[in-house]
Amino acid sequence: MALSAAAPSEICVSKIPVLLNPVFIADLHLSNDKPATKEAFLKFLKTDAARFSELVILGDLFEFWAGDDMAEQYVDVISALKQYFSDGHRIYLMHGNRDFLLGADFAASIGAQILCDPITVQIGREKVLLSHGDAWCTLDHDYQQFRSTLRDPAVQKQILKEELKYRVELANGLRSQSKADNQKKDAAYMDVVVSEVAKSLRSAGCKVVIHGHTHKPAHHTHVNEDSRFDRWVLPDWNFENGNQRGGYLSFENNYIHFGHLS
């Protein structure tokens, strides 16, 4: 797959049609080194996801993504997503902290649109804010500076000029460094700051937010500065070594629900 001239951060859309019957997932961290998790996702597309109109992936679909010329390593995933789109479903995708280099060519190959982070969407009568979630982890100043650098279009274009093997080496190095750094950090530094989420919700005029990133699936009701809002955190996926961790959120009959995989 060729590389688009546009940086991934330049192709995000800020407005989409009303979501009719969406299903939300995040933090699958798909990799060929995690075959059971990948098989769970492929099964999900054929079973649970098939009854929804829209699939919304809120970041970190892949463990890492060094550019759209990695696509040949994930022909099975791309083929399954393309079939899902061909069957009449819409696909929306948001960059995560691991796959922020997903670009226009990948999106086109599966019929997806890449969403801005955050983005306000309409689901039935409800106005909902969607995000990967890492932008709200503001206690971790080093990470926020790092994130800002890697989301800069000029930086992304410079990285994508390198040969794929060097980009893969860079990605592996960043993952190793991140793992080492996270072991030294207090858990609170790696969680979202609720006041920052509340600020984004007030700006968007929303009372509901859905995000991933933290790997702490839950439904929270917050009261912050006299405003009340609901925060839904998506589950991460891990089916390796006998684990059965994963799931999704759906919006049915005007209610948000956690869903367990078939």
Image (cartoon, rainbow, N blue to C red):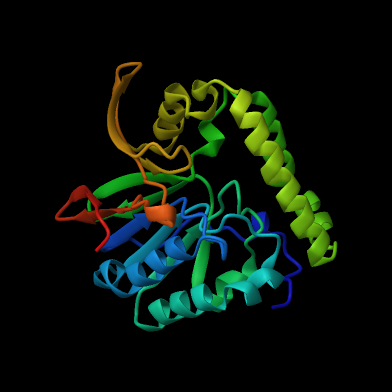
Above-or-below relation of 146 to 73: above
Above-or-below relation of 129 to 86: above
Residue 43, horizontal then vertical, whole percent: 34, 71
Q: Which residue shows up at 27% across the image and 59% down it?
A: 261
Q: Is residue 99 left or right of residue 39?
A: right
Q: Is residue 86 visible?
A: yes
Residue 233, horizontal then vertical, whole percent: 36, 40
**Quadrant where the image shows the C terminus:** bottom left
Q: Is residue 111 visible?
A: no
Foreground pick, 257 / 165: 165
Above-or-below relation of 79 to 37: below
Q: Is residue 168 left or right of residue 87?
A: right
Q: Residue furthest front?
A: 241
Q: Which residue shows up at 79% across the image and 66% down it?
A: 164
Q: Which residue shows up at 31% across the image and 46% down it?
A: 127
Question: Quadrant location of residue 226?
Answer: top left
Q: How many marks?
A: 0
Above-or-below relation of 57 to 107: above
**Quadrant where the image shows the N terminus:** bottom right
Q: Which residue shows up at 33% across the image and 52% down it?
A: 244
Q: Is residue 84 left or right of residue 104?
A: left
Residue 19, horizontal then vertical, whole percent: 32, 61
Question: Quadrant location of residue 202?
Answer: top left
